[in-house]
Amino acid sequence: MTKHVMAKEQAEMAEFSAKVRLEIADKNRKALVVTYGCQQNENDSERIRGMLSAMGYGFADSVSDADLIIYNTCAVREGAEQRVLGNVGALVHEKRRRPHLIIGLCGCMMQQPHMAETIRKKYKHVSLVFGTHVLHRLPQFLHETLMEQKRVIDITDSEGVIAEDIPTYRSGDPKAWVSVMYGCNNFCTYCIVPYVRGRERSRSLDKILDEIKDLVSRGVTEVTLLGQNVNAYGKDLDQGLDFAGLLRKVNNIEGLRRIRFMTSHPKDMSEALICAMAECDKVMPQLHLPFQAGSDSILSAMNRRYTQAQYLDLVSRVRAKIPDVTLSTDVIVGFPNETEADFEETLRVLEAVRFDSVFSFIYSKRTGTPAAAIDDKVTDEEKHARFDRLLTVQNRISREINDACLGKEFELLVEGESKTDSETMTGRTPGGKVVNFPKTEGIKTGDYVTAQIDKTNTWSLFGTVK
Ligand code: SAH
Ligand code: SF4
Ligand code: F3S
């Protein structure tokens, strides 16, 4: 059963927060929070910023401008971990130059005991390490490092606890992430997430609705409901409400215009959920539905609990009810001992479904997962060659799908200036596709406009606002 952080602990944190606030008052202290990994981590970083802001911290744009640096880390692949270690290593000079600088590491990578140990032994300039289960105790940790000069390392696994009512600092975007559940019970054999995020636990309906209503009152019109396995929402609660039911409740919130959600596991994609998506006007026609591999024997070795045929059948049932749905997926290439024939099944699924976009990854061995124990005979060269072949196939499909958008009109939520060109603005279609359009007098972030597509490429669409 899901437990909540008790009022007593919340009161303690409020006290620590007030003490830190007093300590840094008038010192113009600034923090930099850098996020690696997925949207769950982005959302956690918003809560970290919320707690820091409540303690009186402002925010820095760069390392050299910051008095406190927190890296919120990801453990899903080795590359993500290497990047964090490299960046943290480089901070040693900054710490020498400015000894009062506090460097902290948190998130999924730190939740692994061997990693916390590496930091403790080899990265002495890091004074704060905390895991995913104790995020809400940041005021206490900061109090200990700042005022008692202690080095804090806390990766306690407080199984199944949800911390509500943490202040959240958001960027003022018209869009917001809302976590509706935490953790994962699926234990796909390649994946570290269940070990670093704990078991599935759902937030109560009331807390979710209150949070979204509050966001709407502050100008947000689009929310993305988050969970590692979001469509398992409610299974651990006795609210009598599943994810389909939750969508229907959120759909009733006045002033909200768009609802998205991720990530859905194919095995939990119920008929009721497909119907709710089709019937709720605010739920956007977009579905991220990872299939990971096309071969049944690899799917079984991955512990995904569906076959290729079941996946393809699911996709046709979704498309039958939501014909304009945009589909995206995740694929792993090179799972241990994947054969050429197995890999060809993955390509077969890409051709059969024709996803709008595909996030593909080369298998990365994660310490402590069952797949890490498999003696893998496939060479890295072979894996990279397959990965390139997959990209070639999918790039062609993505391009064909985008080309078919030429001349069509879409409603866009304007998200702001393009990152690469200040004369261009970007927005997203109901299906979640990015559309660029020339900056236009009177159109600003948060507006809803209609654009006609007049140019396309593999990754994005270009349009003219009508
Ligand atoms: N809960 C989501 C997302 C998990 S992490 C889901 O079940 O789909 C995001 C993606 O990273 C996964 O979908 C998977 O494709 C990829 N991934 C996870 N572990 C990996 C590993 N060890 N090596 C390579 N890719 C991995
Ligand atoms: Fe990892 Fe599988 Fe859970 Fe996704 S569903 S987080 S891939 S264990
Ligand atoms: Fe990475 Fe943790 Fe997300 S491992 S993908 S940040 S849940």
Image: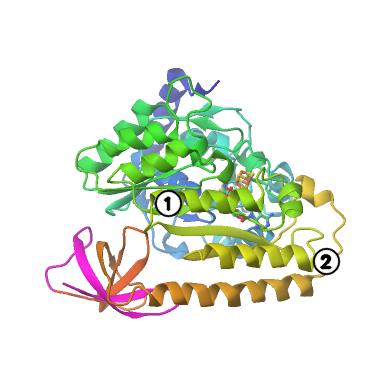
Q: Is residue 104 visible?
A: no
Q: How is the image coloured?
A: rainbow
Mark 2 touches mark 1? (CB < 8 Å): no
Which stretch appears magenta? 441-466
Cα separation, mark 2 vs mark 1, equals: 39 Å
The answer to which quarter of the image holds residue 93 is bottom right
Tag 1 residue: 320
10 Å crowding of disc 1: few (<14), some (14-19), many (20+)? few
Tag 2 residue: 378
Q: Amino acid at mark 1?
A: Ala
Q: How many numbered circles does the render carry? A: 2
In-image side of 412 versus 328 (left or right): left
Report if residue 442 lies within the magenta region.
Answer: yes
Does residue 419 sit above or below 24 in this rendering? below
In-image side of 383 versus 162 (left or right): right
The answer to which quarter of the image holds residue 90 is bottom right
Q: Amino acid at mark 2?
A: Val
Camera-side residue of 218 and 262 = 262
Name which of mark 2 and mark 1 comes first in the sequence.
Answer: 1
Question: Mark number for residue 354?
Answer: none
Does residue 164 sit above or below 314 in this rendering? above
Residue located at (47% from left, 22% from top): 9
Q: Please tell me whether mark 2 or mark 1 is closer to you in this view.
A: 1
Where is residue 309? Give x, y as percent: 63, 52
Report if residue 7 lies within the magenta region.
Answer: no
Query: SS for tag 1?
Result: helix
10 Å crowding of disc 2: few (<14), some (14-19), many (20+)? some
Query: SS for tag 2?
Result: loop
Where is residue 174? Give x, y as percent: 27, 53
Where is residue 392? Give x, y as percent: 59, 77
